[in-house]
Image (spheres, grey):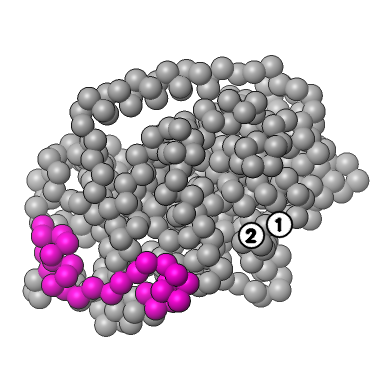
Amino acid sequence: MQRYSALGLVTQAVRHNENWQRVWRNPTPKKHYDIIVVGGGGHGLATAYYLAKLHGVTNVAVVEKGYLGGGNTGRNTTIVRSNYLWDEAAHLYEHAMKLWEGLSQDLNYNVMFSQRGVLNLGHTLQDMRDIQRRVNANRLNGIDSEVLDTKQVQELVPIMDCSANSRYPILGASWQPRAGVARHDAVAWGYARAADALGVDLLQQTEVVDMIIEEGAVKGVRTERYGDLYADRVGCVVAGNSGVLAKMAGFKLPLESHPLQALVSQPIKPVLDTVVMSNHVHGYVSQSDKGDLVIGAGIDSYNGYGQRGSFPTIEHTLQAIIELFPIFSRVRMNRQWGGIVDTCPDACPIISKTPVRNLFFNCGWGTGGFKATTGSGHVFAASLAKGEMHPLAEPFSMFRFHSGALVDEHGAAGVAH
């Protein structure tokens, strides 16, 4: 597992701050762009970067209502994996994984990607049947994946309670060695810095209040700060607010927006060398290089846009985490938060053209958003540059809900939505 010295982390923080100040400058916006990307999170910044670097489209504006990386990109549990069940999802996430593996070199910026592996635990016979099915599907798609028994899980994570009398007995797990974690804010900063260097305009504190649509085609966006900004094409990558922007454009998306809960503990000495996930109890945990335990919970059952913690959901998750890891029972929680996730009925994203010409949407990632950042930006940039959907994006058209060609990853990929 990749570790960093204290001096290295301090140096990294200083560099982050220097680069953060650099991307905080707001350029004077042009009145017309080739492409406007609405949303300055990881996916939007990655889209802008790949548009400039791979497709030579530098007359691009990223329009963000807050600050770069301040939404779901800064409110996730940093897990990166590609062990999804269905071919369409597996190909997309594995494409992202390969980009993750070279991202720090590509951006010339340390995103602290650490391939420490991910365990998806099985607590029942049905869990293990699902794990075996998914691992077989992964291997057929060339994705590294193994089925481990209880003894092998215990050897990987000695501090976890794998006894037969535990509340959630561990019968085995799937194991993806190439999976891991990355530093979420560094991903946003790295993409922002690289896109800025290629000439992309990063317009922060610039909320889109309406779409400019004429004769069935999008012509730009209306903002409070800069008035009307025009573009040949517009791509919306706004995580939990996708339905709001779709309403501005005059159509509905098959999405629900829910708060997704997470928390971190006080820093402790290194005790956990991998990522542990349990779909059965919906809790997952890893340890950051700072030493804090990063714990993910589930989505709240209600719809909402409040980016704040929900104690009942957190409490349920902590009960499960402590059952799995009794050693954590006296560790104090440092802070909790909620992100807002769009979820589709089939738990897969929408990367699609829309009923409005030249308007594209990238949304509905549910809990899969962070791990897809690289691949999402890559294929969305190609789609915006050419005006036609990238082959990896085609199965995720919003119109699949009319045709019935769904890609149902609900619970199939080791995480509940």
Mark 1 surroundings within 10 Å by alpha-carbon count, few (fewer than 14), some (14 through 19), many (20 or more):
many
Determine the secondary structure under disc 2.
loop
The three-letter amino acid code for the residue at tag 1 is Met
Does residue 351 appear in this view? yes
Compare residues 123 and 318 and report the one nearer the observer.
123
Compare residues 25 and 261 and report the one nearer the observer.
25
Measured as percent of width and height from the top left, residue 195 is found at: 58, 31
Q: Do the residues labelled 2 and 1 touch (CB within 8 Å)?
A: yes
Q: Report the residue at 20% width, 28% height from top.
A: 6
Measured as percent of width and height from the top left, residue 156 is found at: 17, 62
Compare residues 303 and 90 and report the one nearer the observer.
90
Compare residues 112 and 313 and report the one nearer the observer.
112
- The answer for how far apart the CA atoms under marks 2 and 1 are is 6 Å
- Residue 32 part of the magenta segment: no
Quarter of the image that includes the C terminus: bottom left
Q: Report the residue at 56% width, 17% height from top.
A: 25
- Say whether residue 314 is left or right of residue 219: left
Residue that numbered label 2 is attached to: 393
- Say whether residue 363 is left or right of residue 303: right
Give the magenta-colored segment's residue range: 135-162
Residue that numbered label 1 is attached to: 389
Q: Quadrant of residue 131?
A: bottom left
